Amino acid sequence: MTDKPETFNAFRVRENEGNFETSIEEMPFAPINEDEILVRVHYSSLNYKDALSATGNKGVTRKFPHTPGIDAVGIVEASHSDSFSHGDEVIVTSYDLGMNTDGGFGEYIQVPAGWAVKLPKSLSMKEAMIYGTAGLTAGMSVLRLTELVKPEEGKIVVSGATGGVGSLSVAILSKLGYNVSAITGKESEKDYLLSLGASDIVLRNEIENMDQKPLLKPAYAGAIDTVGGTILENILKTTKSTGAVTCCGNVASPKIQLTVFPFILRGITLIGIDSQNYPMKYRSEVWNKLADEWKPAHLSETFEEIRPDQLQEKIDLMLKGQLKRRVVVKMK
């Protein structure tokens, strides 16, 4: 590695008598193990898991002090793997990054080479982090849904549409020619969702307060659900015969109460999306599509760029549900 500093800065979370405090700290480098790479992080992004980690959630991060950041993009500075060389531009998301392995809120990350994918040539580092795990999850959801449901088969509904996964799903599906309904609890965001390509807006309480019958009148050819709970239940009940629904979140609830009727009387397919451990060959496919034919026209308008010393402020807003756009963290 050329021009290696003796230490690097990182946004650290420390536990102090049951309280969790954050600050920018200097960190030493550790020896690079076999099949690992050292990446100089240029950008990261803020996700809900990062906010939980920063507040000491032991379901996300077991041991502290710790550096959150489940997303990172940068340049390989040193490699003990045949897969990557010094100077390669790489994206690292999910797996254990930012959870129990120090993550992208540090100027360097040291990770297994198997966690990294080469940055597509038509995607900038900043664009990669505007997408981040949210974009990757949206891409996985779109990939699986579009395998089974075509634009001419009817309308697609997306829940949690103002969130990272939901908003990108709306934009990508619209670009691919799908007629998209966007579900949101934020009536004030109607114009934003229409600008992403949604054809109409469905307020969350309309979906939550539907009849509790086992099946409801068919309305959608398919769906991308990001919230779970009652909303997922009623999406499934209103999906047309042979439709498909992807599921990637549980912020509303991890539980659904259903009969088997949507599945055996309408032949609906429910597809779970696991972005954390998704196979690498599909990750590469999704990133290349996000870099090219799936890239939304207004991607650069969907984020806010901050410095690491501004992270705590944004974490507080995220936990209050007051963030409206993606937050990209410039590390270099």
Image (cartoon, helix red, strand yellow):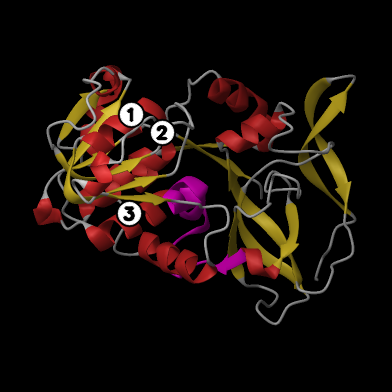
The residue sitting at 49% across, 71% down in the picture is 281
Q: Is residue 155 magenta?
A: no
Label 1: element kind? helix
Q: Nearer the viewer, mark 3 or mark 2?
A: 2
Name the image quarter holding the N terminus: bottom right
CB-based contact (under 8 Å), mark 1 and mark 3:
no
Visible residue check, residue 312:
yes
- How dense is the environment of label 3, judged by Cα within 10 Å: few (below 14), some, or many (20 and up)? many
Residue 308 placed where, x, y %? 67, 37
How far apart, in angstroms, are the residues tagged by discs 2 and 1? 6 Å
Q: Is residue 112 left or right of residue 45?
A: right
Q: Are marks 3 and 2 in contact (CB under 8 Å)?
A: no
**Residue 137 spot, x, y in % from top left:** 45, 50
Q: Identify the magenta region.
A: 116-137
Q: Residues within 10 Å of mark 2 (few under 14, many from 20)?
A: many
Query: Relative to residue 120, is residue 100 drawn left or right?
Result: right
Residue at 45%, 67% (x, y): give it: 282
Residue 298 visible in the shown view? no
| Whether residue 186 is situated above or below residue 70 in the rendered picture | above
Residue that label 2 marks: 228
Q: Does the magenta segment cover residue 124?
A: yes
- Separation of disc 3 and disc 2 at Cα? 17 Å
